[in-house]
Image (cartoon, grey):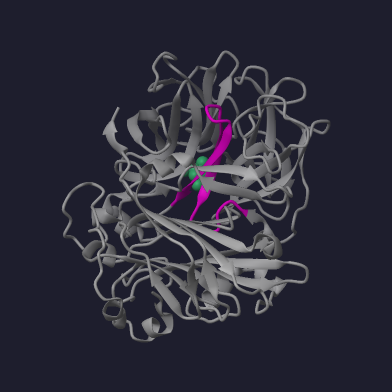
Amino acid sequence: MAQAWALVLLALCYVSSINGERSFLSTRDPAGEEDSDTSIVSRKYRTAYHFQAPKNWINDPNGPMYYNGIYHSFYQYNPNGSIWGDIIWGHSVSTDLVNWIAVEPALEKDSPGDILGCWTGSATILPGNIPVIIYTGGDIDDRQVQNVVLPKNLSDPYLREWIKPGNNPVLQPVGPGFNESQFRDPTTGWIGPDGLWRIAIGAEVNGYSAAVLYKSEDFLNWTRVDHPLYSSNTTNMWECPDFFAVLPGNKGGLDLSVPIPNGAKHVLKVSLDSRDKYFIGVYDLKRDAFEPDTVEDDRRLWLKIDYGNCYAAKSFFDSKNGRRIIWGWANESDSDADDIAKGWAGIYAMARTIWLDNDGKQLLQWPVEEVETLRRNEINHQGLELNKGDLFEIEGIDTAQADVEIDFELTSIDDAEPFDPSWLVDPEKQCREAGASVHGGIGPFGLVVLASGDMKEHTDVHFRVYKSEQKYMILMCSDLGRSSVRPGLYTPAYGGFFEFDLEKEKKISLRTLIDRSAVESFGGGGRLCIIARVYPVALVDERVHLYAFNNGSTTVRVPQLKAWSMATAQVNVKKG
Ligand code: DQQ
């Protein structure tokens, strides 16, 4: 059953012989084409069920919404190439958040208020069930202004055409201390205490970052509120603010435009330092301002939506299922030259349900349940035991397109090593230095994914358990250091820490969605999420392998391991 991990690392070619006969399903090309090209342009690196455009560059998700039975995904899109530039809004529609139909671009850069680009924005559903989009335009004078658009024909189920009213731009970068080239990415609107609409916009004001606040009766005429929703002098610009309400321990989402129940908390998410960071707090109705419960002075300690390759995440209230959904952009980790050669760049993390933990201290996320419709040929193992150095191969599924759920149960917590709080500012350093091959007291244990037969290529997703004064701290890593033998790739070790009540919960869960060049992991029931982009050569020219492993001195049990092949979704392959 188990094989020696240490031996594998020492004698890389040994693995295939000690594992004997393998019965993997053959890897499949998501485009359904034979692909003999082993270079980066291979279509086998295109994801099979993560959102992507039919071709070219995409970045931030924009204006996601559910409207009259249809989910809309708008996205920052370069119609002319596969690196950032000429940005307009691509548009796709779906009934299940998994299969998408590409329709016409929703916004083109064709007016004085957006001639340099149609940048990020949000959708709001106004009374009378009328959707409106507010977005940033790069204007004719190279300033950042805000514009609105409305659907041309409300009876078109896909809302293909959008009209720019004569009022644009509805907001200009005017105000004391404003920087006209740092004023962008309006939020979804919400109703304030006076019944007026509010939006927040990311801005640099007097050299500092702010979510500046505006109010309006009709979404067209806006007045600046004399104070920001929230600001910080520790950074100079926040992109893509997102503001929403959540109830502690309640998976149901809240619509900001209806009165928020007592006990709800508010969340302000901002994008900076290549990450989406968030504060949990209260929206003080009297002050009309957001107050975080706590703010660390060192912004490296701010909580993150995802600790991997994810940026510009945006959430929306899904009125169909009463949940809040968030998704973010996962850029490529190869070079611009590679992206030009491939002709495409950028995917989105899976749509995730997002909610607040019972203690009100952190957000949890989980792939929307619709993703499970893609699961095929389940395999199930129970009662495995992984001793130090064990490597257990998970077979019988398509290991290039898979969904894996695994629980790790510790046989003892006595050997947890002491936690050093200074690690919190740089968990990635900890993941680099204490990689999967470095023995620990408890851990590393986890999954090895997208591994070549000779183990020269593999991506590790794993945990280590440390004992802090009163609690246990779990380090979760997604280490790309040996993900590919290809040169010129960005291969960090992503990571983060989360607190865990091990005495109460005993089991640490890991769910990993493997999707060709995407590895998206959810640790501790969704307490910590990491999406990564990888390009193993083995994905193209051989079969890739999947393992569970333990390399810590404490034996870990696996009471339950389930894994599935994932079918290829219809993601923008057909035009509507
Ligand atoms: N991307 C957009 C901007 C936003 C940035 C431009 C964040 O509106 O600030 O493509 O990735």
178 lies above or below 435: above
Main structural element of the magenta stretch: helix, strand or loop?
strand
Q: Nearer the viewer, residue 274 or 527?
A: 527
Which residue is pictured at 73% across the width and 20% down the height? 195
Residue 57 position, x and y percent, is: 36, 46
Kindly give the residue lying farthest to the right in the view shown. Answer: 286
Kindly give the residue lying farthest to the front in the view shown. Answer: 383
Q: Nearer the viewer, residue 36 or 116?
A: 36
Which segment is the magenta one? 304-330
Count of picture labels: 0
**Image-based side of 237 in relation to 298, left or right:** left
Asked if the magenta segment contains residue 96, the reply would be no
Task: Mark yes or no: residue 108 visible.
Answer: no
**Image-based side of 544 in relation to 553, left or right:** left
554 lies above or below 518: below
The C terminus - image quarter: top left
Task: Mark yes or no: residue 562 visible.
Answer: yes
Residue 444 position, x and y percent, is: 53, 74
Residue 247 position, x and y percent, is: 70, 39
Specify the quadrant of the image occupied by residue 220.
Answer: top right
Specify the quadrant of the image occupied by residue 261.
Answer: top right
**Image-based side of 476 in relation to 450, left or right:** right
Specify the quadrant of the image occupied by residue 110.
Answer: top left
The N terminus - image quarter: bottom left
402 lies above or below 255: below
Residue 206 position, x and y percent, is: 71, 46
267 lies above or below 1: above
